[in-house]
Amino acid sequence: MSHDKTAESERLLIKGAYLITEDDRLGELVGDILVVGGKIHAVGPDLRDERARVIDGTGRAVLPGFIDTHRHTWQGALRNLGPAWTYKEYRSEIQIGLGQHFEPEDVLVGNLAADLGAIDSGTTTIRDESHIMNSPEHTDAAIAAHWQSGIRSVFDHGWPSTEAEQWQFGSSRTHPEDIRRVRNEVLADDSARVTLNAMLRGPELSTPDVAAQDIRLARELGLRISMHVGLGEWGAQQQAIRTLSDSGLLGSDMTFVHACTSTDEELRMLAAHGASVSVASSLEVFMPGLGQPATNRLLAAGIRPSLSVDTETIVSGDMFGVMRSTLAYQQLVMAGAAGPMDLAGTALPTFDAADLLSFATIEGARACGIDDRTGSLTPGKEADLIMIRLDQANMLPATDVAASIVASGHAGNVELVLVAGEVLKADGRLLEDHDIHARAAQSRDRLFRAVGRPLPA
């Protein structure tokens, strides 16, 4: 039985908005967008539909919903625990410390909290990098949350956070076999709102032999692959991308996360194989130990990246902050004050606000393998879109709409959010909160007690 409700979606006609379509054929225009049966039916000026509910888009921008290509959503109820943590501290406190104590209900609540926060700030798709597969029940709870929230999710099945140290950095363990059950019994439909990918550790977090076996498993199951690479000094030493290239395992079905300390040559290898990269710039500039955002080096290699939040235990869960962090680091690159990976080469290509919106939308869809369904305001695609107010004090006078959204936008400017035509936020308010405030507090308190951490006042 399908969880989707697109057949029940109402007909909507947004009139007179500034449309940032992310479709090269349509471009940007002031006009209308008609949503029928959960899909974008038409885009253009002076559209008419007598059966549609009309929404006034005057003084608003409509664009595809943001697509976050890498977030550990199970940590959504543990927001802002360590904004000054190093990578080593994060692993110790969350993955090794708290992760082993998560019960399925904690995973459900964490994912719901992350999803609702994402929807509120205009993110319509999350690629959930889920390394909390402590049991099949934990896995099912994580997936159930995405169905409940209404968000579009690419669920990346990972590894457990029990015995966390045995699953990373040289691990000889192969990927959990439960992924077969999930593929065959839970997320078999690749056209659904919630779909399955494989989050693999690769040679950087396991071994070359384990990585090869895991990749074969994912491809046997017909799954796209994500993989963390280029993590600090360890990543620079391991050169996982080179290892995969030498083994003939690189492919266009792969998205690599971070790549902060991957070499320029490795990035060119990814480009040659059509692989994509997710830049988690907010985390990479906040958290010592990972390295710096590779955005400009990726452009030099011929890769247009996608963007991601990573973990809300450290950074804000909205794409506005991610875009601003990405831009801020570029300015350091241009000023000659960037990290060693950027200073080593010649002048790098740059990007602007319009590029950042592209990274946060259509490039995210491509990285997830769902650009045939979402990521642009193209007729025939799913109606995953957001409407942002340009007439509020922080946005006026919106001389350049893309620049205003990137430089000044926040969740409060997001007035309307649709996923597959379903209205999840209207008039600036989420339509469902799932009692998340109380449930998140209860989950946090139980986990704090489990590790002897003092409860908040």
Image: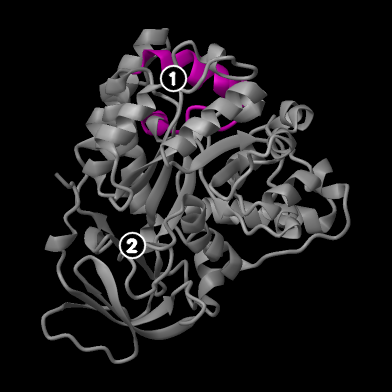
Q: How many marks?
A: 2
Q: Residue at x 48, y 27 (%)?
A: 81
Residues under labels 1 and 2: Cα distance?
A: 31 Å
**Helix, strand or loop status at disc 1:** loop
Q: Residue 160 carries which label?
A: 1
Check if residue 36 falls in the magenta segment.
Answer: no
Q: Where is residue 252 in the image (x, y as percent from the top left)?
A: 58, 50
**Helix, strand or loop status at disc 2:** loop
Quadrant where the image shows the C terminus: top left
Q: Dot 2: few (<14), some (14–19), or many (≥20) neighbours within 10 Å?
A: many
Left or right of 18 on screen, residue 416: left
Q: Residue at x 74, y 28 (%)?
A: 238
Which region of the structure is painted magenta? 75-102
Q: Three-letter amino acid code at disc 2?
A: Asp
Q: Work out whether residue 200 can be spotted.
A: no
Query: For residue 254, which quarter of the picture?
Result: top right
Q: Position of residue 80 (x, y in %)?
A: 47, 33
Per the image, the residue denoted by label 2 is 384
Q: Is residue 26 above or below residue 316?
A: below
